[in-house]
Image (cartoon, rainbow, N blue to C red):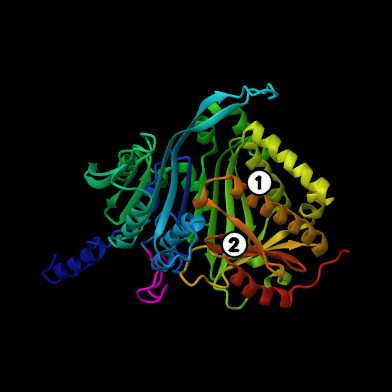
Amino acid sequence: MSAKTLPCLAVVLCLLLPVPGTAAPRPITALVPGDCLVAYMARPYGTPDAPTSTSMPATSAPSDSAPPGLSISSIVAFLSVSGLIPDEGQVFADIAAALPLLGKFEHAVVLLDISSRIVQPTTRPGANDDGEVSLRLKDLQAAVIFRTEGDQKIVLAQINRIVGRYTNADVAALAESSSGGYAFQRLTDERLPGWAIWEWGRLDDFFVVTFGAGAFERIVSTYNDRTRGLAEDAWFTSATAKTGGNTAIAQWFIALSRLEERLTHVAQQRHTRVIRALEADDITHDLWTVGRQGPALTWYRCYRRNGEDITRRYSDPGNYPPEHRRIIPTEASHFAIIHVPTRWLVDNLPRAWLAAQSESHVRAWSLIWNRLEEETGIDIRSGLIDHLGENVVIFDYPQHPLKVPFALTIAIEIDNRKAVQMATDTLLGAWRRYLDEGADQGSQKLLRVKVRHDADGVWYLQAGILGPAIKVTDRYIVISWSPQALRDALVSIERFSKPSEGP
């Protein structure tokens, strides 16, 4: 080998060797325990496409997501001090103040464990002999993970604000601890059960907030590769590839078989009712993925039923119906037309919610529902559910001024405005009376919600902050994140939608 060859070989070796500091960042799923029950992972969708959902790069919202020095936290704080947020809206205002964190950082929300306990059997006179029991939460472990890359000041500010508002030194204690080489803070409150503790701390590029005894240690153990993470789960990896994981901006994973194991030993009847209402008896794993093709969003699903993986494509940008595509405002940055069994969702999701309640609550709701239909003469199924189409249009116009993620406008196809209008007004009017009566009888001022109805037909919730809002148009039920946002979106929708057929 000549002396002239050596420098050439050295150059080649330098090109082949890895450059320090250029290793791919760890995926956020590397912190999510592989035996979790439910996991939601997402990244700010105002950023460039991600290469894959299992190796998402650290991203953040654009620097102009809010005017300099202005944040939803400061706005809420100002309104609170000014007395413009009523007591009954404070909890919802605090939740809204935390939402921009989801628009700034890649994040994961994880249910690690849950269990319930029997308080006492139902023994009141006249109760059915159906084995009804009163259940209460026995244990819970959950975590929220942010990829902050060391910029966790905004997360800490939110934690400090919440701690300062809802606890005090007389009942709470803050301590420092460590696990697996990582320090974290632990907050306990003597008013809560022993397992109900808050913990938070930094894990290199990530910041983790957990609830429940042992939850933070589980995240650390997964991060240190002592326990298997969701990133190494064979089924999750395979399902991610089948659902367009290379462009994923959001994923929902549900381990139905593990949920059954955790809940059925005490809540067998309720769990079985819920699963049957959702027609998910034989499903063990379920993954939903929202991806992106330019401004268009894809919506894919993969689930395992009876040992077989089934893939569904609910939003395919190449096949968007033009009559629905044209109502999307040109100002929208992202949009989707989702083809789903809307009637099934509207019918079965409430059934599943009812199935999760106690027998006494189910009976009470059945009486309320039957009385409502008798008083109004309206059959909700024939007046609302039977007139829903299978196309749902979603877009991000008007955009939220503080970049709250998934603050979207949703237009659900209908075929008979008159019938749907009557059913919707009846339902929302009844809900308004129900909430007003409950507010008069209850004592939970911080969680009070009101339903409002304006002269232009817009219905909306008021819980300290306004929204979401809903209105029935000629061809769609339209929902948006605030009354004014709804009115802005309706300009485009009502201009291009044709009147529906029907009486």
Span of residues in magenta: 59-73
Residue at the extreme left of the image, as rendered = 3
Q: Nearer the viewer, residue 31 or 489?
A: 489
Q: On the rendered image, what quadrant is the N terminus found in?
A: bottom left
The answer for how far apart the CA atoms under marks 1 and 2 are is 19 Å
Give the percent coordinates (x, y) of residue 185: 27, 47
Reading the image, the residue beneath label 2 is 468
Viewer-closest of 141 and 8 = 141
108 in relation to 472, above or below: above
Q: Residues within 10 Å of mark 2 (few under 14, many from 20)?
A: many
Does the magenta-highlighted stretch encompass residue 202? no
* Image quarter hosting the C terminus: bottom right
In this rendering, the count of numbered labels is 2
Q: Sequence order check: which comes first, mark 1 or mark 2?
A: 1
Q: Magenta residues: mostly which secondary structure?
A: loop
> Is 62 in the magenta?
yes
Q: Position of residue 465 (x, y in %)?
A: 53, 63
Q: Tell whether 97 sits left or right of 260.
A: left
Residue behind mark 1:
349
Q: Quadrant of residue 318?
A: bottom right
Does residue 456 appear to the left or right of 288 in the view shown? right
Look at 57% across and 45% down and name the residue there: 442
Residue 360 appears at what percent x and percent y?
66, 32
In the image, 192: left or right of 429? left
Residue at x 39%, y 35% (from the top left corner): 193
**What's under tag 2, amino acid-wise?**
Pro
Say if 465 sits above or below 492 in the image. Answer: above
Q: Quadrant of residue 471?
A: bottom right
Image height of 76 relative to 311, above or below: below
Q: Residue furthest front?
A: 440
Amino acid type assigned to the residue bearing label 1 in the image: Leu
